[in-house]
Image: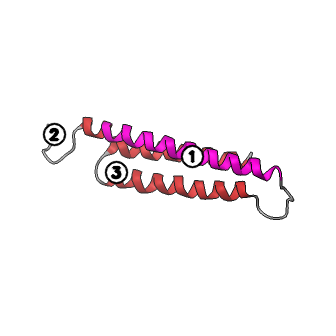
């Protein structure tokens, strides 16, 4: 039997879906930013200074990784397992995706 102070599974799924939409928008914006920086670097590449694509990827990696830890860890600490795990997995995957874009 569920305790009265625990959230329902329906609420957790609703929060997961809402955060998932925000996560995908954030990942898409990060991938677009790194891609545009890489495209701009192809026109003015001298190889001496770090490219703006690597700086953009580093910023996106910190943003997505920090977001995964803060929101996922916070939701897990509140006892919301479903949204917490979704946040950790989706934003963690986004962070790996963005960092691999800059490396390749």
Disc on the earlier residue, 1 or 2: 2
Q: Which residue is mark 3?
A: 75
Mark 3 vs mark 2, foreground winner is 3
The Cα atoms of the two marked residues, 1 and 2, are separated by 39 Å
Residue 65 x, y percent position in the rendering: 52, 54
Predominant secondary structure, magenta span? helix
Viewport quadrant of the C terminus: top right
The Cα atoms of the two marked residues, 1 and 3, are separated by 24 Å
Left or right: residue 11 compared with residue 65: left
Left or right: residue 91 compared with residue 47: left
The vertical placement of 72 against 86, above or below, is: below
Disc on the earlier residue, 3 or 2: 2
SS state under label 1: helix
Mark 1 vs mark 3, foreground winner is 1
Mark 1 vs mark 2, foreground winner is 1
Q: Residue at x 75, y 47 (%)?
A: 39
Disc on the earlier residue, 1 or 3: 1
SS state under label 2: loop
Q: Nearer the viewer, residue 46 or 98?
A: 46
- Which labelled disc corresponds to residue 29? 1
Q: Looking at the image, do the residues carrying marks 1 and 3 touch, with CB atoms under 8 Å apart?
A: no
Q: Quadrant of residue 82?
A: top left
17 falls in the magenta region = yes
Q: Looking at the image, do the residues carrying marks 1 and 2 touch, with CB atoms under 8 Å apart?
A: no
Q: Few, some or many C-alpha atoms within 10 Å of disc 1 (few <14, some 14-19, many ≥20)?
A: few
Q: Residue at x 15, y 48 (%)?
A: 5
- Which labelled disc corresponds to residue 2? 2
Q: Residue at x 34, y 51 (%)?
A: 75
Extreme-right residue of the structure: 46
Residue 43 x, y percent position in the rendering: 83, 51
What segment is highlighted magenta in the picture?
14-43
Left or right: residue 13 compared with residue 52: left
């Amino acid at each position: 039997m569920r305790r009265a102070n625990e959230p329902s599974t329906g609420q957790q799924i609703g929060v997961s879906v809402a955060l998932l939409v925000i996560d995908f928008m954030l990942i898409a914006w990060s991938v677009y930013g790194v891609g545009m920086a890489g495209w701009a670097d192809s026109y003015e590449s001298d190889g001496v200074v770090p490219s703006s694509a690597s700086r953009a990827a580093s910023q996106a990696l910190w943003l997505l990784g920090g977001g995964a830890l803060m929101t996922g860890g916070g939701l897990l600490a509140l006892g919301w397992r479903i949204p917490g795990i979704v946040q950790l997995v989706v934003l963690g995957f986004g962070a790996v995706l963005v960092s691999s874009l800059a490396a390749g």
